[in-house]
Image (cartoon, rainbow, N blue to C red):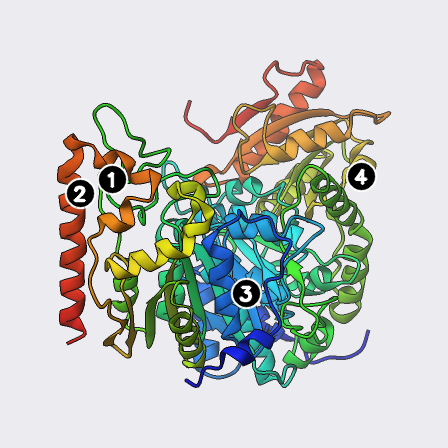
Amino acid sequence: MPFNIKELSTKKDLLTGGHRLCAGCGASIVLRQVLLAAKTPIVLTNATGCVEVSTTIFPFTSWAVPWFHSAFENSAATISGIETAYRALKKMGKIDKDIRFIGLGGDGGTYDIGFQALSGAMERGHRMLYVCYDNSAYMNTGIQRSSATPLGAWTTTSPVGDVIPGKVQWRKNLTEIMVAHDIPYVAQASPSHFKDLIEKVERALDTNGPTFINIISPCPLGWRHDGDISIELARLAVETCYWPLYEVVDGKYRITVTPRNKKPVIDWLKPQGRFSHLFIEKNAHLLETFQKKVNDEWEKLLKKAG
Amino acid sequence: MKTINKKLIALEGNAAVALAMKQINPDVIAAYPITPQTEIVMYFSQYVADGVVDTEYVTVESEHSAMSACIGASASGARVMTATSSQGLALMWEMMYIASAARTPIVMPIVNRALSGPINIHGDHSDAMGARDSGWIMLFSENVQEAYDNTIQAIRIAEDPRVRLPVAVNLDGFITSHAVEVLETLPDEEVKAFVRESKPWGRTLLDVDNPITMGPVALTDSYMEFKRNQREVIDNVMPVILEIGEEFNKLTGRKYSIYEEYKLEDADVAIAVMNSTAGTTRVVVDELRNKGIKAGLLKLRVFRPFPYKELVEALSHLKAVAVLDKADSMGSLGGPLFGELRSAFYEAKNKPLMLNYIFGLGGRDVTPDLIHKAYKETYKVLETGRIPEKLYSYLGVRE
């Protein structure tokens, strides 16, 4: 895809300033990058969550695209209904425009409570892109663990106590679960690699079928880091292979960004306060397990990408 | 009344509702099968497979997604329908409040069925009554004909610019949904003309040149005004329901109002009831009348908005009313219909004695004998003037 930064800089921001997301929030950066890829008008649904509550406090809105929120667990079902209405009305000649549809949710609204609706919509084959901004916990309600929360992370429902050192489970690999839906396009992206991200969104929107992109979204509040290192942390997630950047087109894997030197995962963990307890001696085994899980998943991915 | 080619055919309730849906030919249907509604989605799927409707049918993976997809499609300017029962409706419950608040005029037949637990697939009104405060207009249908007619009228009511609210059309599970009855159907073109072409109201989500934000956060400074405005709308829909009923009457000769009365004018004692039990009650009224007993019947068609003024007017000349609820409202005064009706009479000058019978739960058979029992007991209360301490009793239960 030809990609011209100058041209992009002249594009209208479809998520405008003035919203109430935190300084350094990954989600707003992610979404502005996603929307930069749009070549046609977009209609967007938003699961309940940080982005929803922070961008649309009545009577204000930050959205310059038609935007709809109704509940937490149904962003995918809702956008599938909108896309269906579009097909019905287009068939009757009541609409002539070319419109694309994006369902949006955080990891809570996507990996967990909205998982069924997402799976259903993907199986039905709607022409829609589902974007998950994965900040790896229920940040909107105050940092509770989700199935996207990594091993050992402190959250308010996986607190660090005398006997339990944070989250005891690894994380659900949702991207691979979406690949298993046999849909034409699945990708993982990061706002630190914005060219890669925008190109992936372009490819997804150009695909005539259901598509899914999982995007890592640093959260200064929940990850416990300064807001000015959010993008750096997103980059470290890629460079440590915790969050590999790849895409699966019609079942064919391609790693889109291969780190030159794979960094140890502690480089990503260390700056985050939610992992600080992993660096005391008695939890050293958790760091080892963490590194091993990352290695295993990366090796598996390398094999799939041939 | 103009001459139209009406047809008498024998259909079960679900087939009649599906036929109405075919004739309405909505833009989008998103639905999920559940007993006893299942046949509706089966029949409609066949219509889609045969290409006799233009509808885009979304075979969602749950009722929650059904209602979510319907709301999205309706907010996009499409004419939208779905159908459900029981647990399906319960799963939609969250979204029903949002459908009415978003002013999406979705029409949904509810084939009434008991709610779990214990699980039971048969008919009662627990499902609909659970959604009674969700801001939907609720119509009830005695038989197959009414289910067909109400479904067609519901489209016009929902989409009327003075309304723009979702409408639920209730019919009794199995008793109506699976019973074959003769009904008079309208030709396709007459239904098409009656429901008119659907026109989006205001801006829609697909108006990409004028983007709107729908479903924002409304906090302490605005939420209450939203709800207040919504109430204003539903409080004022009755004239529209009557107007459309009148228009339908002109087309079909069948009368549709807020309620239907049977031998009520000179009655001493009446039963107030909804859906199919009205048919059984009518037979019992005739039997009692043959014995010189002045029994009457009021069958309620519009439960939401609740026509409290109209019902006081209709019933205040009576000496006693037995309210029959096919649903319980655990821990309250009695069944939901009873609670509302009794409350409506608080300021009335003439108050009939009022008793409550909870009946037919989980599809328990409602025989004429049971209805006779309700009339008999109510007469007894009337004679003694003594209202039982407990205002409700279960009819047809093994104690």
In the rendered image, residue B175, in percent from the top left (x then y), is placed at 49, 52
Q: Chain of mark 1?
A: A
Badge 3 element: strand
Residue B312 to residue A77: above or below: above
Tell which of B2 and A255 is nearer to you: A255
Q: Residue B118: which quarter of the image?
A: top left
Is residue B369 depicted above or below B88 in this figure? above
Q: Which residue is mark 4?
A: B314
Question: Chain ID for label 3?
Answer: A
- Residue A174 visible somewhere in the drawing: no
Mark 2 vs 1, N-terminal side: 1
Q: Which residue is mark 2?
A: A287
- Whole-angstrom CA distance, mark 4 to mark 1, is 68 Å
Q: Is residue A17 above or below residue B114?
A: below
- Nearest to the eye among marks 2 and 1: give it: 2
Q: Nearer the viewer, mark 3 or mark 2?
A: 2
B159 on left or right of B179: right
Q: Which mark is residue A44?
A: 3
Q: Which-is-in-front pick, marks 3 and 4? A: 3
